[in-house]
Image: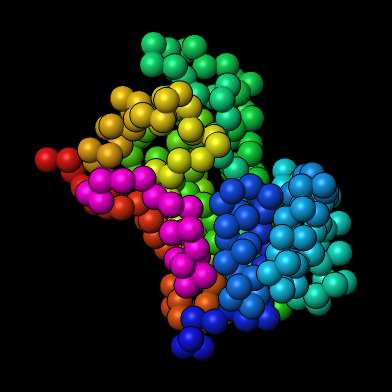
Amino acid sequence: MNEIFSIKNKVAIITGASGVLGGSLAKSFIEAGAKIVALGRNQETLDARVQELADLGGDAFAVEANVMNIESLEGASKKILDKFGKIDILLNIAGGNIPSATLSPDQSFFDLKMEAWNEVTDLNINGTVYPSYVFGKIMAEQGSGSIVNISSMAAYSAITRVAGYSAAKSAITNFTQWLASDVALKFGDKIRVNAVAPGFFIGDQNRAILLNSDGSLTDRSKKVIAKTPMQRFGEVEELNGVVQFLCSDAASFITGALLPVDGGFSAFSGV
């Protein structure tokens, strides 16, 4: 492999590592030779993930921490530095929508419970900002590092029924640009912050919205496919390559970018 794309021996923290997307990225990064820190709130599921990674012959470490708690993350930071001595990569994967923050087709914004709004925005905004604050400080002290955040198609244009998630992911795009500029200006060009914007992938969080109980497409899914030039949903593994690229030296002059991985959804007017 061309070494410019290599992430071998880099220490990568993956929040939400026990989830589908985080797990896929963890396996991909292990296979590329990175050292993985699986970070999440449930030690048992983290240990299971780390065992899977160890079975692949990789070096992985589980750290229980809450991405919405600064003190918890600072404790995790100490454990990671004690073990590996550095932090090269932060993948902010923890996040997603929650059922209570999803409006049904016959509901309006005024039916949304503000508790659900607070929960989904806190998870998706602070769940990225706080790890960036704690682990990004280590990168600033080192003078190098790469942070990759997860945005959404909702950051390009409004998506019905998910107001809180849409607002939060739009905020992540803006925060990515802001932080990328701030760290580059104050700590040098070796610290980069970027985001990927996944298109439509069927996962546990959105399965009921996109698929009927018999596996057929819902009306919402049909609208998505109609606006996706590739005429299909994405596979979670299709995010691995672009994230690895952003963390490698091949992307050394890329910061503050939002890269869509969407089958053309964001480029197509539907006309």
Is 38 placed left or right of 112 in the picture? right
Tell me the residue at 51%/88% (across/down).
3
**Residue 168 pos. (x, y %):** 51, 39
Number of numbered labels in the structure image: 0
Q: Residue furthest left?
A: 271
Tell me the residue at 72%/55% (across/down).
49
In this view, 96 is above or below 257? above
**Residue 199 pos. (x, y %):** 38, 47
Is 64 placed left or right of 185 in the picture? right
In this view, 267 is above or below 3? above
Tell me the residue at 39%/60% (across/down).
259
Front residue of 85/227: it is: 227
**Residue 103 pos. (x, y %):** 46, 19
Q: Which residue lies furthest to the front in this view?
A: 214
**Residue 261 pos. (x, y %):** 38, 56
**Quarter that holds the C terminus:** top left
When asked about the image quadrant of residue 227, the answer is: top left
Residue 142 magenta: no
Residue 119 seen in render: yes
What span is colored magenta in the figure?
Answer: 228-245
Residue 134 seen in render: no
Residue 232 magenta: yes
Give the colour scheme of this rendering: rainbow
Tell me the residue at 39%/11% (across/down).
106
Is 27 placed left or right of 54 in the picture? left
Front residue of 266/218: it is: 218
Front residue of 122/267: it is: 267
